[in-house]
């Protein structure tokens, strides 16, 4: 038994040595491993904790410290295009903001509006060591603030026909802004510019025929309503009362005035030519009658001279004496001939005097109703005065034949009418 144990032990020992020798012979020499690992060194400047979006309640505050991958003491922080109230500590990069409702009520900040902010950090020693980036900040409120439509005019507004009415439609935005604006009125109007959104302009020019003669006090009232609507269909209405006064269309009124003046000048020229013809007839008649009077006076005087100078004892002077007695009677016989051949033209004389008086009056009317400017406010009254005087003059001179063919120029007629002889002959006594 002992012998078996010794043999088994020897066999195990022999097998172990053979195995070790085999492992050694079949082993592979592996390369040595270098434990020194080379990693990329982080040298680029970066902001390592920047949040790309901030959302703040109107009553909250913000304090957020930004960090970089390098020591902070050598860097300077700054902001660009920051909304009102947002600040950053230039030394340690702490963003801070204290929301104040007064900023929103004053319109310097708006709710639900995304404000892009440019932020940068700069090495004070190396200008190239710098980083610029951006983030977005917005503000919201849980308070209910209703938007309002606010026209830039105070109702009521007074304008005249032909003048342009123009004003802006402003908005006081609440929690949500007004996105569209509608316009309505109690009277249908046209040719106006429709404001579609806030800050647009409403423009309208009422025509000269907008106000009718039947309208009370010659004015017409238009109630304009501007209805603003948000994205949630909340509406706000602003009303503007517009009072349109009746006005004069100066273009048409000026044409009417010029037509009235032209008609007046045309009739004045016709009256002057008629006066010229009448005056010439009166002048010819006066020449004939003056010739008869001179002839009669000469005959009478000659007869008287012959009758008084003849000697009644001398037979030769008896014939001269008889002739002297007959000649004075010839003047008496010639008087009916004078009246028949050249009668006094009283009708023509009266017509000429009336014509001249009317011509002078109409010339004064034209002078008195001249326009003071291109937009004379009394142009309608002056036009009516000229027309009225012309109608009155035509009525007074209805019996005067003014339809006479003119063969003289206007300058010749005016020269004759204003001549000193005519003025002496027809001046008032």
Image (cartoon, rainbow, N blue to C red):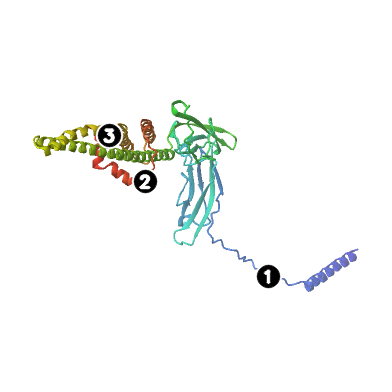
Circle 1 residue:
32
- In the rendered structure, the answer to whether residue 51 lies left or right of residue 321 reads right
Disc 3 to disc 2, C-alpha distance:
34 Å
Q: Residue furthest front?
A: 315
Between 22 and 175, which is closer to the camera in this rendering?
Answer: 175
Q: Which mark is residue 337?
A: 3
Tag nearer the camera, 3 or 2: 3
Disc 3 element? helix
Residue, x 23% and y 42% (percent of image)?
A: 420
Residue, x 29% and y 45% (percent of image)?
A: 415
Give the percent coordinates (x, y) of residue 392: 37, 31
Give the percent coordinates (x, y) of residue 316: 12, 39
Between 207 and 374, which is closer to the camera in this rendering?
Answer: 374
- Identify the image quadrant of the C terminus: top left
Disc 2 to disc 1, C-alpha distance:
139 Å
Circle 2 residue:
407
- In the rendered structure, the answer to whether residue 376 lies left or right of residue 153 reads left
Give the percent coordinates (x, y) of residue 176: 55, 37
Residue, x 50% and y 52% (percent of image)?
A: 119
Give the percent coordinates (x, y) of residue 319: 15, 37
- In the rendered structure, the answer to whether residue 421 lies left or right of residue 389 reads left
């Amino acid at each position: 038994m002992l012998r078996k144990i010794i043999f088994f032990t020897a066999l195990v020992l022999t097998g172990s040595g053979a195995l070790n020798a085999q492992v050694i012979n079949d082993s592979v020499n592996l390369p040595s491993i270098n434990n020194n690992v080379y990693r990329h060194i982080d040298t680029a400047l970066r902001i390592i904790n920047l949040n790309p979006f901030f959302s703040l309640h109107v009553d909250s505050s913000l304090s957020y410290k930004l960090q970089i991958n390098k020591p902070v003491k050598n860097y300077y922080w700054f902001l660009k295009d920051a909304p009102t109230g947002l600040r950053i500590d230039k030394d340690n990069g702490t963003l801070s903001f204290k929301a104040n409702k007064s900023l929103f009520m004053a319109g310097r900040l708006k709710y639900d509006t995304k404000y892009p902010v440019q932020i940068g950090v700069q090495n004070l020693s190396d200008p190239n060591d710098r980083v610029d980036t951006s983030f977005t900040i917005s503000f919201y409120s849980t308070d209910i603030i209703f938007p309002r439509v606010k026209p830039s005019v105070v109702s009521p507004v007074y304008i005249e026909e032909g003048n342009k009415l123009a004003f802006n439609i402003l908005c006081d935005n609440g929690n949500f802004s007004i996105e569209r604006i509608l316009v309505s009125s109690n009277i249908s109007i046209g040719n106006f510019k429709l404001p579609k959104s806030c800050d647009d302009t409403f423009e309208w020019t009422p025509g000269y025929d907008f106000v009718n003669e039947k309208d009370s006090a010659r004015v017409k009232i238009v109630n304009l309503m501007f209805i603003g609507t948000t994205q949630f269909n909340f509406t706000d209405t602003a009303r503007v009362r517009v009072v349109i006064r009746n006005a004069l269309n100066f273009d048409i009124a000026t044409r009417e005035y010029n037509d009235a003046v032209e008609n007046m000048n045309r009739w004045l020229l016709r009256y002057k030519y008629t006066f010229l013809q009448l005056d010439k007839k009166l002048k010819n008649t006066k020449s004939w009658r003056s010739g008869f009077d001179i002839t009669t006076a000469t005959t009478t005087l000659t007869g008287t001279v012959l009758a008084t100078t003849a000697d009644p004892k001398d037979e030769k002077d008896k014939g001269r004496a008889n002739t002297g007695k007959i000649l004075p009677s010839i003047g008496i016989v010639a008087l009916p001939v004078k009246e028949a051949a050249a009668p006094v033209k009283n009708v023509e004389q009266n017509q000429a005097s009336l014509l001249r008086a009317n011509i002078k009056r109409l010339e004064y009317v034209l002078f008195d109703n001249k326009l003071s400017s291109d937009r004379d406010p009394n142009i309608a009254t002056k036009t009516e005065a000229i027309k009225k005087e012309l109608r009155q003059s035509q009525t007074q001179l209805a019996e005067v034949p003014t339809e006479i063919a003119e063969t003289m120029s206007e300058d010749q007629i005016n020269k004759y009418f204003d001549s000193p002889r005519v003025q002496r002959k027809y001046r008032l006594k």
